Every structure is written in structure tokens, then in C-alpha cells.
Image (cartoon, helix red, strand yellow):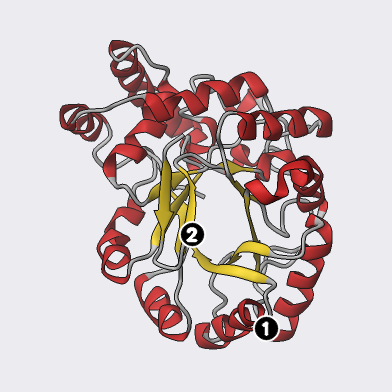
Amino acid sequence: MEKRTLGKQGLTVSALGYGAMGTAIGYGPTDDNESIAAIRRAHDLGVTMFDTAEMYGWGEGEKLLGRALAPVRDDVVIATKFGFTPTFGFDSRPGHIREVVDASLRNLGVDTIDVLYQHRPDPNVPIEDVVGTMKEFVEAGKVKYLGLSEADEATIRAAHAVHPISVLQTEYSIFAREVESLFPVLEELGVGFVAYSPLARGFLSGAVASREHYDANDFRQHIPWWAPENFAANLSIVDELTALARRKDATLAQLSLASHLARQDYIVPIPGSRNPARIEQNIAAADLVLTDEDLVAIDRIAPEGAIGGRM
């Protein structure tokens, strides 16, 4: 698979990565054996970037990813994140960061975390203090590269002044395009971009269903895209995109992922799936070539993304 460089500090990864949140939380019942098979199939097909977080099962997601990747640890890039509390508050106090990072190293079973992100900006802790603490782990050899998630321009600039930020991670899909306004500052500073939920939390997977088809603990129950007043309109967008994908002999998911790869060479989408067959379909998007006309067509179909805001 094509490699892409994120930032100017030497971080090189596959053009498509793997987001591991669904192996632990968010999308209904999980099966560890199936998840491990999916992760290993992704690696077999050329994926080298694997993304998790403390919050994904409060350590259980990290443990699963660590087990899955242990046989190929030296061939992959493992990213994790800190900053949430179990009640979904924020905690990026320096002492807490140190505790979480040490726990993540143990959970993953690694000596070094390749990419460490602040999961969300903490309004109670200056970003300079946060990145200063993250920098300690780089200097100690426990972390290689630093990242931010869902940060705004001012936060990115302030963080980058303390220590180079290699990558910003934010939700980005045809349905959620707000982050495109940050691309100029990423280009100015030389920061790469990782797109999480590039398939719009499953709405662009080709298998979207209305809310009643999901478990009560599935967080899509709370996303406005699935709200009854928005669902039909968003399904119409999906129908148009699907027709475009068919004209390219591709699936909707492949079209969605390829659109990211075609827009900028510093974008790496990280779709996640627990199904090895779905993994294979997603990774085939790396070989789908989209023209400028295709991107214009996508922009016409969904000029402002989906109807209803993202969660």
C-alpha cells in the first residue's frame, strides 16, 4: 500500500489506517476473536497505522489491540489517546497524563507508544502544560510522536510552539466536513491529518439502517444524522453517492475513503471494522482513483455534509 508522511518529524504510515474503537465500545456487542482476526487481516493487506485510546473500554481496547499486534509490533505504528474521564469529562492534568500513559504502555504491552494524542482539549489545563508533559515522554523515549484530536487552530498553534505536533485527528467524512477549514494551518505548520469515522459512523458503509435496528447502547441512537427528521434526507444523499460509486465500479465505502485520499496527500483515513471481509473491501479503496470531476460530483451531492450535526 502507498505510504504517507504525517508531519515533519519522520512519521510514515500506510495511506489507510485502522480505527479500533469499535472493537471495545460504541457499536453493539463485540467479539474479541473476530476483532483480532480483523486487525491482523488489515495488517496482512498493508495497513501499518492502528489507532486506539484509553477511553475505548478503559484499557480493554488497548489490551486487545496489543495482543493482536504483538507478533508484528516492529512493523506497525500504534497510536493511543488520553484526556477523558469515565463520565466523559476532561482530565489533562499533568499528573493524570503520566498515570494514563504508563497504564497505556502496560495495556498495549509495548515499550514505546508511536503516537500519543490528547483526546480532547481540556478547558481547565493550558495546552502548553499538556504538551509540555507529553514532551517529557518523547524525551524519555516512551513516545515517538505527538498528536492532537479535535483541536482548533489556536490550540494547534500553541501546542506546536511547545513541541512539534505531527498529526491532528478529527472526525472527517463526506458527512462531516467542518475540519476542512483547518487544512491551511496544517499545511502551514506541516502537520498531518488522520480522519476518524471516515465512513460517517457507518452511514457511508453501504449498510446503514434506521435507529430501531441498533442496540440501545449503540451511540448512533444519539447522533442527529439518524434522527427521524433527518434520516430520510441523509439516505437520499447516500443513494446519490452510491450511484456515483457504481459508475466507478466501487462500493459506497470505497468511494468515501478514496475521496479522502484524493483530496490531500497528508490525509490518512482510519476506518474500523470487526469483520475481516469488510476490512478487505475498505482497503481496496487505496486502489480506487478519483478524478477532479468525481470530487466535484461529491461536493455537489453533499456540499455541506449531512443533515443534522455530528455528535
Write the residue at 68% across / 51% down.
74
| Residue labelled with disc 2 | 11
* Secondary-structure class at tag 1: loop
Along the line of sight, which residue is nearer the eye, 4 or 187? 4
Q: Is residue 52 left or right of residue 71?
A: left
Query: Label 2: few (<14), some or many (≥20) within 10 Å?
Result: some
Q: Identify the residue shown where x is 49% and y is 30%.
A: 203
Q: x and y percent of residue 255 in the render?
A: 37, 26
195 versus 238 height, above or below: below
Above or below — where is 69 with respect to 37?
Answer: below
Tag 2's secondary structure?
Answer: strand
**302 in relation to 104, above or below:** above
> Can you give x and y, in whole percent of width and height, for residue 184 in the image?
25, 63
| Residue found at x 67% / y 75% | 141
Quadrant of residue 230 in the image?
top left
Q: What is the quadrant of residue 5 in the picture?
A: bottom left
Q: Is residue 188 above or below residue 196?
A: below
Q: Give the label on residue 40, or none.
A: none
Q: Which residue is mark 1?
A: 93
Percent position of residue 186, x then y? 32, 64
Tag 2: amino acid: Leu
Viewer-side residue, 255 vs 164: 164
- Say few, some or many: other residues with alpha carbon within 10 Å of mark 1 (under 14 / 14 to 19 / 20 or more): some
Residue 1: horizontal and vertical position, in percent?
46, 34
Amino acid residing under circle 1: Arg
- The disc, 1 or 2, on the residue closer to the chain's N-terminal end is 2
